[in-house]
Amino acid sequence: MCRQISPIIPHNYQQSSYPVAVFTFAVTNSGTTAADVTLLFTWANSVGGKSELTGYHSNSSMTEKDGVHGVLLHHRTADGLPPVTFAIAAQEKEGVHISECPYFMMSGSSDEFTAKDMWNSVKEHGSFDLLDPVNSSTSSKPGTSIGAAIAASVKLAPQATQNVSFSLAWASPEVKFCSGKTYHRRYTKFYGTDVDAAASLARDAILNHSSWEMQIEDWQHPILQDKRFPEWYPVTLFNELYYLNAGGTIWTDGLPPIQSLTAIGGKKFSLDMSNGETDDDNEMNPQTNTATDILHQMASVLERIHASLASNSAIGTTLLQGEENIGQFLYLEGIEYYMWNTYDVHFYSSFSLIMLFPKLQLSVQRDFAAAVMMHDPEKLKLLHDGKLAARKVLGAVPHDLGLYDPWFKVNAYTLHNTDRWKDLNPKFVLQVYRDVVATGDKSFARAVWPSVYMAMAYMEQFDKDKDGMIENEDFPDQTYDVWSMAGVSAYCGGLWVAALQAASALAHEVGDKASEKLFWNKYEKAKSVYDKLWNGSYFNYDDAGTKASTSIHADQLAGQWYAKACGLSSIVDKDKSQSALEKIYTFNVMKFKDGNRGAINGMWPDGTLDMSTMQSREIWPGVTYALAASMIQEGMVEEGFKTAEGVYHAAWSSEGLG
């Protein structure tokens, strides 16, 4: 049996940033005689792609310390990307002997020590103790690929069990984006920027993984053992966190991008002169001193340029008011959607961050607060109609933080002009208030309040008739980006009503009494307008008066859900919210696959699927979970769990679609 442990530990902002994994095997001798067992852990000196066969990759044995033996695998990446060094390790202890094979040929020339030779050696001897030292050095040649192995040899008595742990670490201290900007990862704050830090990471993982596992169990055990929940619930709850460690996440040290100059004589000169300086380095000739003076002068200029750039960027660390800088966090919208921190859907997923890593959530929020104040007039061609639009205008919450140059060039999304989307700004305000309620962080509230006010003021342009309610513009101007809304809509209108109440409450928190009253008055006006969407059993999709307006939208009460989650007043009467949820449950949930898939986004009142757009006939897990939470808020506990269970059956069960 094998347990794999990675230190993803709630409220832990150090070990949770480590690029490590530990594989613990429980080896049992079920026989009646003693047995000699060898476990083999191998790793390729490769990251995939064309760099694998370019040659000049090298492996070397780690220096033994605390009984931990291992191998470093130094990999030279292609196309100027930052290098990476892997480390594999295991600990010698009573009953467990560790040996290593630092080098074997995986592919290419067969006249060297090959993977087959490595396997035959450990099969014959049970370890690598008799390995010829000539096979434990050298770099790979172009056209070949290499690997390394660790062997753990165990002698087991009958019916005995022994635990054997192997660790894997990967040190790639730099994150380089296509713009050329390079940042240091969060873990370098604790291990430095040398790629050989992989050895220390792997060693510390071996020595500390038991503590990590205990902390993870302390977090998960109460939920796993809570018999009030159905069996599928903890499976789904914890599995849905997969994206935090497997979703293309990047966690930087929170410092500005590394500024470096051109290579001189093949050596890159860094403007950071504090690292790597020895006594001999100080004995420079006049020529060197002149070069150093020039470097420092250029560094000063670049620092001023960077300060100017940061003033028109989404660098939220500038909003810190004495708090710890725990870095900046990015994650991709999806495996096929290459945009960092897509905000319209972060609205749904952010509950995991605010509950488990609240400081990371506040960091993301500061970035978006800074982005609200950005104005980037660069013209982008929209995929929808070919028209040009500014990348980002002052007051608009961006769709995402960019791709090729995150924080500086936001809005990698170009299907529509998201500066005219109606859900992003309300979602920002609601999330900010939710986060203030969850953390009690008044300093954060004060820091982002100007951006909240600006985001609300920006939305006034979409209230055409000045009745306090924003109107959609008959194009997909919200997260359902191929599903149009016109006039007042249940989705965006509800978010707006909730955001007005949240803005008033946040104004109260920061002591802005005038704004508190302003937004409350607007809230009461907008709430009465929103109520006009009520048709007797649910809220119409919008008020355009077309067939599309009658679609039963699974997400129609998103604003109500967030308002209640934040401790705000309901934005609709209880009897109406319950009626709407019962309608959605009966139609969007139970009329499709007997409720075993989740909630269909749109259904017609006659009980048929809304096939008018691609997205109306889709099931979105985040929306389904939000809907389920809304039901539970209204006392519809059985219906809520049944709704969420549909996603489990589709995605996580052994009979599912995955």
Image (cartoon, grey):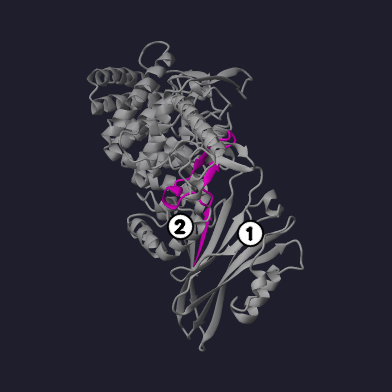
Query: Residue 613's x, y, as percent?
Result: 58, 30
Residue at 39% x, 60% y is 212
Distance in Å between CA atoms under marks 1 and 2: 26 Å
Look at discs 1 and 2 and give the one toward the viewer.
1
Which is more N-terminal, label 2 or label 1? 2
The residues colored magenta run 166-194
Q: Nearer the viewer, residue 134 or 181?
A: 134
Three-letter amino acid code of the residue under disc 2:
Ser
Instruction: Give the labeled residue for mark 2.
Output: 6
Measured from the top left, where is residue 250 in percent x and y? 49, 43
Nearer to us in this view, 25 or 185: 185
Relative to 640, residue 129 above or below: below
Crowdedness near tag 1: few (<14), some (14–19) or many (≥20) residues, C-alpha within 10 Å: many
Which residue does the numbered mark 1 point to in the structure image? 58
Asked whether residue 70 is in view, the answer is yes
The amino acid type, in three-letter code, at marker 1 is: Ser
The picture quadrant where one finds residue 126 is bottom right
Would you say residue 214 sits in the magenta stretch? no
* 48 sits to left or right of 187: right
